[in-house]
Amino acid sequence: MTIDEEVVNTLTSRIGSKEENTLNINIKDRMREQDVPALANAWYELLTEYKERSLDFAEMLLRIVGVYVAWIDISLIVNERFVSLIYSFLLTTSIRNAAADCLTDIIKKGMKPLDKLQLISILGIVDVLQQVDLSSDSEFRGRVARLVNNLGLQLCQIWQDTNPQANSTYPPTANPTAYSHVSQLVPILLQFLRDEDDNVSEAVFGFLRETLNIFKTIKKATGSLPQEQKALLRQILESIVMKMKYGENMEWVCVAIAGGSESVGTIGEDSIGDEDMLNFLEMRRELKRFYDQIAALSASLTTTFLHSAVTTTLTTFVNEKASDWRDLELALYLLYLYGEAIKGVPQFAVVAPSIGVNGGKNMNPISPAGAPLTPLGECLFEMCKSGVSAYPHPSVSATFFEIACRYSNFFEICPDCIPDVLEAFVDARGLHHPLLANRTRVWYLFWRFTKDLKVKLSPFIQTVLTSIRDVLTVEASLPPILAPDFDLSTYKDQTFETKTYLFEAVGLLISQHSIPAQQQFEYLSVVVNPFLTEIQASLEACRAIQQSSNGIIGGVSGVGAGSPRHRDLELVWTLHHRLMALGSIAKGFPDVLTNKKGVSAGATGGPCAQIFKQVGEITLVALETLSRFEVIRSAARFTFGRLINCLGQDSQFYLPPLITGLLQECSIMELVEFLPFMGQVAHKFKATIISILNGLLFPLVQKVFFFLNQVPSGTDEAMALVELRKSYLAFLMGLFASELENVLVTEANRQHLNLILQSVLHYAQDMSDVPVSRMAFGILLRAVNSWGSQGENSGGITPTVVNDNKSGSVSPDLSERLEAPGFYQFMYEHIIRITFEVPMKPTFDLQDGQSMLVLGEIAGLQKAMAQKQGDVFLSYLSQVYLPSINCPADLAQEYVQALQQLDTKQFKKYFQVFIQKSRS
């Protein structure tokens, strides 16, 4: 072993010097010539002698053989006497682990495919393994499973190497011989795959994967799988499914089957450890990949198996009512997985092709009277009608709801099943489930189900709302002891964040067009009024505290539950939750349609609008009362982001006090989120919002510059400033996209236009953040498109003023585009300059994809200036600017001609070549 560690081991060769490695190679060569045959004979003699006298010594000898076999003549070990001796050790309890490992090392020896195939044939391991007792020792089973896995991997690789489709240099008998060995080994593979010890099962996953790859290659070559492979595939599928089943000593945990974050809640006191459970779930995910491979190889086999497994299990449940939860959970889990495994849109009913019934969300499924269901449709129908969701183990109902959401379009085909599912959703199986983990997941699933089927759910809305009224509440609690530096704005309540899906689902249900407006009003009142009352009471309590100066809202601190600080922060936290709940309900309502001018296309004063106006008013009161708290500002911004869509123009009345309250004490990240909010407002209302934007623009820009001019105190703040730059530029881009760039040049803002343009210019030149640079150039492009036609003496025009019929205020008339004072000079002094300077910078990476997008934006900007300014711009380039940067006259003339004659796409290619040549 010492010789191996110091001379042979690959790690030694990696860290040794060149001279040491050369010496080691010479030692190995000399050993092969003179010493190794004697060593091999000595190993055999010693193993024969000590297999009875000292098993420990014999075990060490087997390890030595395994180490040396990688580089010595294989025939010294693989011969009748030596192999027979090793095989005999497999029957000796104390030494069989080492014997299995030694055989694994022999199998792994690097050899040419035909030599390895001959070695495997000589060894005859499959025949030996059939005689070995694998019943008791899981560690030994794991060693043998590792041997089988390595043997299988070698055989699969030989099969791939000798495949006539890929390589015709091998004898024609090599490939079928390799496959024959694989097929003989598969039954042993399946035995280990079904082993009760997960570690043993996982040890053969590699061989299983490559076996399925062989089947895939065969199918690709022949168009379909031969019957022999289909039979093996069926056995593999059965073994995989058997292994997916929870073990007898396992307890289920509530997880989101579709992936993502896991909400874990164990059932029972004898649950296995979390690590074991996570290992099982990870193994299930790996088994699912095999399941998907099999489905891709034979969809019909998978469908037939699924139908049999699910219907048999459900029939047993219906008839006996005493099924094991593990059987039911497995059957439903398979039904859930089927939707991912089978490619294409799930089919629920067998109909003529012209009818086109399917489960696609972008289609319009119909209900064909009397059309027979597909196997998948039958499974879903049986699931809904069997009452399996009432089984008392939480795993069953949890998986039931996951399936109902995955195949929600099935209920378009079979609407008679909707009441069964809705009843389960609203009772103790779903939204009223005693386990928080289950309830939390169902909140989200109920939202998905409602969103997909809201039209079909109209007849059941009153029953649903009555059944869930008691869960439409918020619970906001804080840790019993608060640290002195506790910050409410960074505290997360994941449970409540998930519950907002439930509130949005309620909004989706109530807002159905098929429900009369007055009925919608009554439903919405029942849901919203309790929150309005509670918020009003909380605000009165806050005012009382402020007046008494007894608490953090009034200035007093504390740490423990019951202290003024804890009590008041919990009150603020509760207010935040209630406002968020109201905003989530509003989110479920459809947007009020607006025309191109931002004017509401339909009536906005319906009964529900009156309720949402109350929500807006009380939100403003909460913001005014508690604007110092970031969580209240955040909740107000969220709620109004939804109310704007519900109320349309009617929400504009609330915007000035809202904006004032949000900006008064906002943080960097709040401003990052506020700018998209204002972009949403601008896009929604366009010209009708001009009076608000006109007064807001420069104070907002000042706030942005105040933060951007700060030196970041740490990594988090530096990242926040990067996000603020992006939000600021996106806001400016949004103004142009919404055709609101005139707000930049109104009487109130034109004096600040140069400051804004200079900031955009600065970020365009900063290649330390390439995406930001691209955004800035995009803004300059839009500015040129808007104002680039004006001449040198343009000083802007005084905008016409019109009277706002609603408020009596005056607003600029945006029916005609206003000129931008000084933009002509800005374009010639700065924009032209940076379009050449930026790509010529050493930091501009012409090999970087993002930088090339910037280069394309710059080329488009130059093309836009040429189109807007015409000969004036082209003459300036050829006679003034290009000569000033020492560009030869002939090249300058060529450049101007390209700019004038090529289209934008062609010029971008030319510009790239021009920059590359100029830099070289």
Image: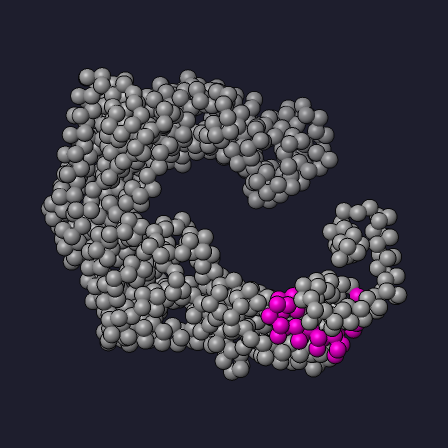
Q: How is the image coloured?
A: one colour
The residue nearer to you, when weighing 343 against 778, is 343
At a point 48% along the width and 30% down the height, the residue shown is 716
Q: Which residues are magenta?
A: 72-99
Q: Is residue 224 left or right of residue 158?
A: left
Q: Does residue 131 appear to the left or right of 452 in the view shown?
A: right
Label count reads: 0
Q: Which residue is located at x 76 percent, y 51 percent? A: 12
* Front position in the image: 357 or 684: 357
- Relative height, residue 653 to residue 54 (above, below): above
Residue 908 located left or right of residue 562? right
Quadrant of the image occupied by residue 610: top left
Q: Main secondary structure of the magenta part?
A: helix
Q: Residue at x 26, y 25 (%)?
A: 563
Residue under the point 40% across and 75% down:
305
* Residue 417 falls left or right of residue 710: left
Look at the image and tell me in which quarter the N terminus lies: bottom right
Q: Is residue 86 magenta?
A: yes
Residue 74 colored magenta? yes
Q: Quadrant of the C terminus?
A: top right
Q: Is residue 733 above or below residue 114?
A: above
Q: Position of residue 498 (x, y in %)?
A: 31, 45
